[in-house]
Image: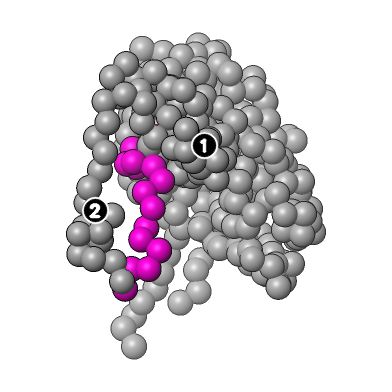
Amino acid sequence: MFQIHCPHCGATREEEEFSYAGEAYIARPANPEEASDAEWGDYLFMRKNTRGWFWEQWQHTAGCRKVIAVKRHTGSYEIAGSWTLAEGKEHYLKESEA
Amino acid sequence: MPNFQPYLQSPLVNFNLPAQTVPAEASQKVRANELPLMGYIVLRGELADTAVAQAITKATGLAVPTACRFSSGDAGVLIWQSPDECLLVTARNYVPALLAACTEAFAGLFAQAVDNSGGLTTVYLSGVEHVTLLRHLGVYDFESVTPGDVASTVLGKAGALVCRVDGDGVFLVIRRSFADYLWLLITKAATPYRFAVAKLPAAGKSPFLRLVDAGSPAKRPVAA
Ligand SMILES: [Zn+2]
């Protein structure tokens, strides 16, 4: 069990208050009509399953009910930080560029 | 037309709390009782938007609370739930007028007021060991809930809003559908603490207790 900081509530709460909501920032194909079946299948079903630092979504179901972005190490469970989806995306994009 | 006669009853009606209620005494280390049949209005809208915040204040006379806090006044208690949601706990009799006032104030805004009076109820939990009892029920750091704070968390398997007005006790705003489960959980966990279904304290200035005295339509027959 771990604790997650909710940027909306401004509070650090137990994992029990949250629900896991999968990998964060999966980009939807810009033009679904023209996406190939493989691209669409990737978008719908393929996930990274990283061992290491991973950007994921958690929903504060027992609190504000907002979905937030969390950067967590899937091996050690260490949490680097949590952000609103919009704020987290900036960090995420900066990292993906690097 | 079938003879459909809706009637109003507390979700805890089967526990017959009024018949079990005894006077409050110091020997009861945990006490609880229901504040039945109050009014609950959900207010949705971006609270950071000044137009929305002003409309809420105009309609209810209450200040929009900051995160994890509540404000109170004549209309009742306004509880922060999320950056775009507040819950107004009020007297059942006040609901129609407040709902109309909110709908009028929200005209032209991306905001909405919805009556959820059928979905929630409130339990007052007090006694010297009431925080110990909360620790049995949930993982939240309950001693950190100070007057004016609200913790939206889980008790057992059910969600609850834990609101503290003063050091004597907390008001638990819970779902109707889980009221039965939570009441059983509270009474069972409270057994070692000389639990009693105690008479609610005199309302005085308490923003929650005053709402019970303000009356509910249950006290008069429901028109067919
Ligand atoms: Zn939250």
Judging from the image, what secondary structure is the residue with disc 1 in?
helix
- Amino acid type of the residue that numbered disc 2 sits on in the rendered structure: Asp
Question: Do marks 1 and 2 share a chain?
Answer: yes
Query: Who is closer to the viewer here, B82 or B29?
Result: B82
- A25 falls in the magenta region: yes
Q: x and y percent of residue B78 in the render? A: 66, 46
Segment tinted magenta in the rendering = A18-33
Residue at horizontal 28%, vertical 19%?
A75
Q: Residues within 10 Å of mark 1 (few under 14, many from 20)?
A: few
The image's colouring method is one colour
Residue at horizontal 43%, vertical 22%?
A79
Q: Quadrant of residue B8?
A: bottom left
Q: x and y percent of residue B77 in the render? A: 66, 44
Query: Is B99 above or below relative to A92?
Result: below
Q: What is the number of the mark on residue B74?
A: none
> If the image is split into quadrants, where does the N terminus of chain A sit?
top left
Q: Report which residue position mark 2 lands on.
A: A42
Query: Is B173 above or below relative to B60?
Result: above
Q: Report which residue position mark 1 lands on.
A: A94
Query: Is B98 above or below relative to B29?
Result: below
Residue that lies at the very extreme toward the front in this rendered image: A98
Residue at horizontal 62%, vertical 43%?
B79
